[in-house]
Amino acid sequence: MIDTLVGGLSFPEGPAVASDGAVWISELRAGAILRIGRDLVITRYATGGSPNGLAHAPDGTVWFCDQVTNAVRRLTPASGEISTILDRIDGEALAAPNDLAFGLEGDVFFTCPGQSRQDPTGYVCRLDSAGAAVKIADGLLFPNGICLSPDGRNIYVAETYGCRVLVGERNGTSPIRLEPLFETPGPIGADGVALLPDGTVATCVYGSGLIRLYDPAARTINDIALPDRHPAGIATDPLGYWPLIVTGTATGVLLGVTL
């Protein structure tokens, strides 16, 4: 079953479900971050940029990638303050950061696709709790969605124009080797990625109007058709109202998906 929870959104991205059950998303084209309560009441926070993927920090702030300011930024909901956490790496501006995920130690992993739709120049970074950032993977065709396993050991990355989802095992602060996990239909490909409690990997396939589910144990694939051709962001709901929360950018909707 697929429920349309909210409509009329301006290129919604980056869903994340908070501990109180509220869904947080970004409106990339409107330059805003939205909190959507279970009562569907919406609170908007202007960011002055183009926010994309977002995640909740342990301290209750909302961190997000901004592809126009080329920065990882932070929203403090209590005050509405927006601050920049990181905008450079190796002496150069970040390449249009797209999505991020927190590790167990408070470190942050984020993707930077830049202009890597044809040339494999995209990369993945790790920002540690002390503020030091390093590239941990590169040579990618538009790295997009990112998530971690519950134990923080494995990193999953959607390589959009590679039409696949990759997985790599963390090795301290060393670079990681990302290996293909499963393929997705083209001509665009995997966008957001999320991990279900049973270990199933779910990704939105932008341009194909579906969610692809991959069971690593059984090595099986199942596709769920969506009412929006360009699904982008995807997240699990820890409270179990909907197994998956998905943003549809073609029609500007937030969807609740029951498997």
Image: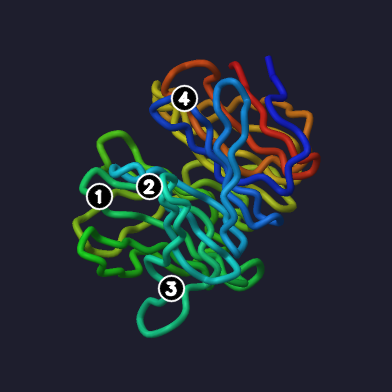
Return the disc, 2 or 1, that comes first in the chain's sequence: 2
Quarter holding residue 185:
top right
> Is the residue under label 1 in contact with that under label 4 (CB below 8 Å)?
no
Residue sitting at x 38%, y 69%? 86
What is the x, y in percent for residue 24? 53, 38
Quarter of the N terminus within the rendering: top right
Q: Residues within 10 Å of mark 3 (few under 14, many from 20)?
A: some
Residue sitting at x 47%, y 52%? 80
| Disc number lying in front (4 or 1) | 4
Q: Which residue is mark 3?
A: 87
In the image: residue 229, left or right of residue 23: right
Q: Which residue is mark 1?
A: 106
In the image: residue 129, left or right of residue 36: left
Residue sitting at x 56%, y 44%? 192
Q: Amino acid at mark 4?
A: Gly
Q: Amino acid at mark 2?
A: Thr
State how far apart marks 3 and 2 are (Cα): 18 Å
Quarter of the C terminus within the rendering: top right
